[in-house]
Image (cartoon, rainbow, N blue to C red):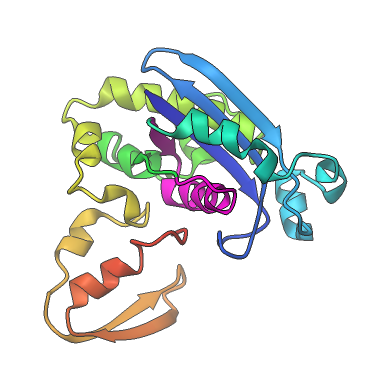
């Protein structure tokens, strides 16, 4: 059973931000068998640029439940399922952190539909949810709202299940895979080619500007460690 999830948040990192909306569609591989959607009071202001992007305002969440009041229901829907999301580490890191604060320890197998789409459906110009759905003819209503994005991810995941002739989904679920911890837009082969020797490494942004420099005794281990914690990637 799969729990397909999307959240909206106040920012990029789970340790400093809150969830403003969550949608969970429990999917049995054929159809959605349970749905939970709710606005959430993040107990902190929503930045103006995020309000503009999502359409979720401070006024909309002021009377919404805080995450702690829905934590048990969320945990019961997710625990024991395969957690699926578009850029899964982002959504999972927030949900796990919020559940932990409420006293629940979430541990799920995870699947990233960005990485799976790149493997199963290669060749598209963009793998962002909106652009990929447009390319595939998948209806995406209420973009950047949890319910709309989750429904579109369900449709995308159905297609991935149908088109997965090379068993990429099964391989990703193997304990040794660790596919879900890697950045969604970087091929695993790029990481596998990293040397295990000492050296210096650089992280570049989209404009090829160096944004981080590090050094390590084991380059492959150190670079991978940046993406193996609960911070979103």
- Looking at the image, which is closer to me, 45 or 65? 65
The answer to whether 66 is drawn above or below residue 215 in the figure is above
Q: Quadrant of residue 223?
A: bottom left
The answer to whether 212 is drawn above or below residue 107 in the figure is below
Residue 149 in sight in this render: no
Query: Is 101 a magenta residue?
Result: yes
- Looking at the image, which is closer to me, 51 or 28? 28
Magenta stretch in the rendered image: 81-105
Which quarter of the rendered picture does the N terminus lie within?
top left
The spot of residue 76 in percent (x, y) is: 50, 30
The answer to whether 146 is drawn above or below residue 53 in the figure is above
How many numbered discs, if any?
Answer: 0
Which quarter of the rendered picture does the C terminus lie within?
bottom left
Residue drawn where x is 30% and y is 34% of the image: 121
Residue drawn where x is 33% and y is 27% of the image: 160
Query: Is 166 a magenta residue?
Result: no
| Residue projecting furthest to the right | 59
- Looking at the image, which is closer to me, 11 or 38? 38
The spot of residue 94 in percent (x, y) is: 54, 51
Q: Quadrant of residue 114?
A: top left
The spot of residue 87 in percent (x, y) is: 44, 47
Residue drawn where x is 34% and y is 38% of the image: 117
Horizontal arrangement in the rendering, residue 146 relative to residue 105 (left or right): right
The spot of residue 213 in percent (x, y) is: 36, 85
Residue 210 in sight in this render: yes
The answer to whether 201 is drawn above or below residue 178 in the figure is below
Horizontal arrangement in the rendering, residue 127 relative to residue 14 (left or right): left
């Amino acid at each position: 059973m799969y729990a397909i999830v999307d959240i909206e948040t106040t920012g990029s990192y789970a340790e400093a931000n809150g969830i403003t909306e969550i949608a969970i569609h429990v999917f049995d591989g054929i159809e959605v068998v349970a749905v939970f959607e709710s606005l959430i009071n993040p107990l902190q202001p929503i930045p103006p640029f995020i309000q503009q992007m999502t359409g979720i305002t401070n006024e909309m969440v002021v009377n919404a439940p805080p995450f702690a009041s829905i934590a048990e229901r969320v945990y019961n829907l997710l625990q024991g399922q395969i957690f699926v999301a578009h850029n899964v580490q982002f959504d999972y890191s927030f949900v796990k952190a919020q559940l932990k604060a409420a006293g629940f320890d979430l541990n799920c197998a995870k699947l990233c539909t960005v990485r799976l789409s790149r493997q199963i459906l290669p060749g598209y110009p963009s793998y962002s949810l909106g652009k990929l759905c447009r390319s595939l003819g998948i209806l995406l209503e209420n973009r950047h709202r949890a319910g709309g994005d989750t429904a579109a991810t369900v449709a995308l995941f159905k297609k991935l299940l149908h088109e997965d002739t090379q068993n990429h989904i099964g391989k990703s679920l193997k304990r040794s895979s660790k596919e879900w911890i890697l950045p969604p837009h970087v091929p695993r082969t790029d990481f596998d080619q990293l040397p295990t020797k000492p050296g210096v490494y650089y992280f570049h942004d989209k404009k090829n500007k160096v944004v981080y420099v590090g050094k390590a005794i084991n380059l492959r281990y150190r670079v991978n460690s940046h993406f193996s914690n609960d911070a979103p990637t």
